[in-house]
Every structure is written in C-alpha cells, then in structure tokens.
Amino acid sequence: MESRGGPGVFIVVEGPEGAGKSTLARWLGARLVAEGLRVVPVREPGGTPVAEAARKVALKFPHGMSPAAELFLFLAARADLVERVIRPALEAGQVVVADRFDLSTMAYQVAGAGLPLAEVTQAIRLATGGLVPDVTLVLDVPVELGRARQRAARKVQDRFERQDDAFHHRVREAYRRAQGPGVVHLDATQPKKFVQDAAWREVMAATALSTRGTS
Ligand code: Z5A
C-alpha cells in the first residue's frame, strides 16, 4: 500500500554517479529555507546511527558481499531513516529533501546487480511502510561525464564506483526508464543554474509548496 507521509512534502533527488544530486539537493534545501520553509535534508544511506553504520559496511567493506546482503544493508538504513527521521518530519509538516531513495535500489541492486524486481519491490515496501515521495527528480548524465565530474572533484571511489562500465550503463538505463507518480527526468548535462531552475519548476508543479508561501 503506497502512503504519503503527512502534511509535509517529500522531495527526492536521484541519478547515477556524478549527476549532481548532492549539489542540487543542497541548493533546493537552501532555496526552500530562504522561502521560509522548515527543511530536513537527508542522504541515503545514512542519517541515523544504524543507517550510518550500514553505510560504512555497504560502501567501504573491503571484502566481497552477496547482492542480497548488500540489499538488506541499504534497506536496514532506509527503514531506520524513514521511521526515525523522514516520517516524523513529514508528520510535523516539514519539507524533506533526500539525496537518493528507493529508485537507487531499483537502479543498483535490481538493474545493476540483477536481483529480482518483484521481491525487491516488496522488500522496499517493508522497509519504507510504502512511503512514496511527492516528487523524484531523476538527473541524467552519460556514464563518462559523471565519472569525469567525480574525478575532477577528486572523490574517493566506493565499492559501487569501482564496478565495471556495463554495470554503470545498466544503472543509467534503469534511471532513464523510471516512471511513476511524481517521477520527473532532468537533463543534468546542462549547467547547474539550468538544472536548478528546471528542478524548482518541477517541485512547484508537483507539490503544494507554491500555496504555502513560495513563488
Ligand atoms: N546505493 C545503492 O547501491 N543502493 C541504494 O539503495 C542506495 C545507494 C540508497 C552512495 O554513494 C552509493 O550507494 C552509490 C549508490 C549506492 N554509489 N555509487 N556509485 P555516495 O552517497 O557516496 O555518492 P553518490 O550518491 O554516488 O554521489 P556522487 O556520485 O558522488 O555525486 P552526485 O551527488 O551525483 O554529484 P555532486 O557531488 O553533486 O557533483 C559532482 C561534481 O559535479 C561536483 O564537483 C559538482 O560541483 C559538479 N556538478 C554538479 N552538477 C553539475 C552540473 N550541472 N554541471 C557541471 N558540474 C556539475
């Protein structure tokens, strides 16, 4: 059963590596605060002690790991974050801006690692209680451009970033095919300002924020 999280608004930024998710999520958060809204920024995996511990294992563990073990680490992190941070914020009428959410699991664990869609969908539902974002902004960049941006930013590679090209192309294609309530695709090869303006228009169109004092 899908559920909205209360009177608040839940905005998710998604996409492959180097697409500009963190940059956009930070900008959106700051813009919403400037509009007088109470904003709770989160990034996945992470945001609670359990989720941060799961993040460390999922991204930094130096040994191999089965795709199912990896899935449950991400879902343990998400379940804790949803229950302790996201739902309470939405129930209190706040705006949650998340850097990654359930589409990441579909892209990396289903399309990338080959886990079965139906079972993963059920497991995500169990972890989130069926919580659905009001809007999911999916940033698209070619794999090579995303990598080049990460190199330029001197980001230390995690276990996923070391996967081969075929894995990353499956991830990108999964994002490009994503659809559903509130899912919006943005061309993230464009300059930051262009992406930010487009994202803002989509957020205003997909949520009730414009009637809560923003323009
Ligand atoms: N993962 C998973 O497998 N399953 C799951 O369910 C979940 C996650 C939730 C988390 O990595 C990893 O967990 C992720 C998938 C997996 N692994 N991978 N790969 P993370 O949190 O460490 O990092 P990330 O989410 O992958 O973020 P990122 O790739 O590092 O980058 P980004 O947030 O998309 O980009 P950015 O940091 O905002 O920007 C990168 C650089 O590009 C930076 O210098 C910016 O200034 C620049 N930038 C941004 N936008 C632009 C534009 N428009 N033009 C030019 N330059 C730009």
Image (cartoon, rainbow, N blue to C red):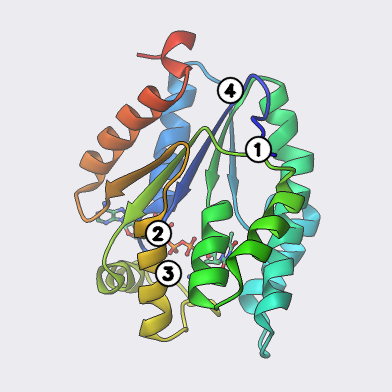
- How far, Cα to Cα, is label 3 from label 4? 33 Å
SS for callout 2: helix
Disc 2 target residue: 175
| Label 3 within 8 A of ligand 1 by Cβ | no
Q: Which residue is mark 4?
A: 38
Give the mark, 2 or 1, whose residue is nearer the N terminus.
Answer: 1
Dots 2, 1 in contact, CB < 8 A = no
Q: Circle 2: is it few (<14), some (14-19), or many (20+) Cα within 10 Å?
A: many
Q: Position of residue 198 (x, y in %)?
A: 27, 35
Q: Which residue is mark 3?
A: 171
Q: Earlier in the sequence, mark 3 or mark 4?
A: 4
Residue at numbered disc 1: 2
Residue drawn at (45%, 9%) of the image = 211
**In this image, 12 relative to 89: left or right?**
left
Image coordinates of residue 164 in percent, x first then y, are 41, 86
The spot of residue 34 in percent (x, y) is 44, 21
Q: Nearer the viewer, mark 3 or mark 4?
A: 3
Crowding near the residue tagged with mark 4, few <14, some 14–19, many ≥20 C-alpha atoms within 10 Å: some
SS at circle 4: loop
Q: State which quadrant residue 210 falls in.
A: top left
Q: Secondary structure at mark 3?
A: helix
Q: Are marks 3 and 2 in contact (CB under 8 Å)?
A: yes
Which amino acid, by three-letter code, is at mark 3? Val
Q: Compute the Cα span from label 3 to label 2.
A: 6 Å
Q: Gap between marks 3 and 1, in whole Å?
A: 24 Å
Select label 1 or label 4 by which is in front. 1
- The answer to whether mark 3 and mark 4 are in CB contact below 8 A is no
What amino acid is found at the position of numbered circle 4 in the picture? Arg
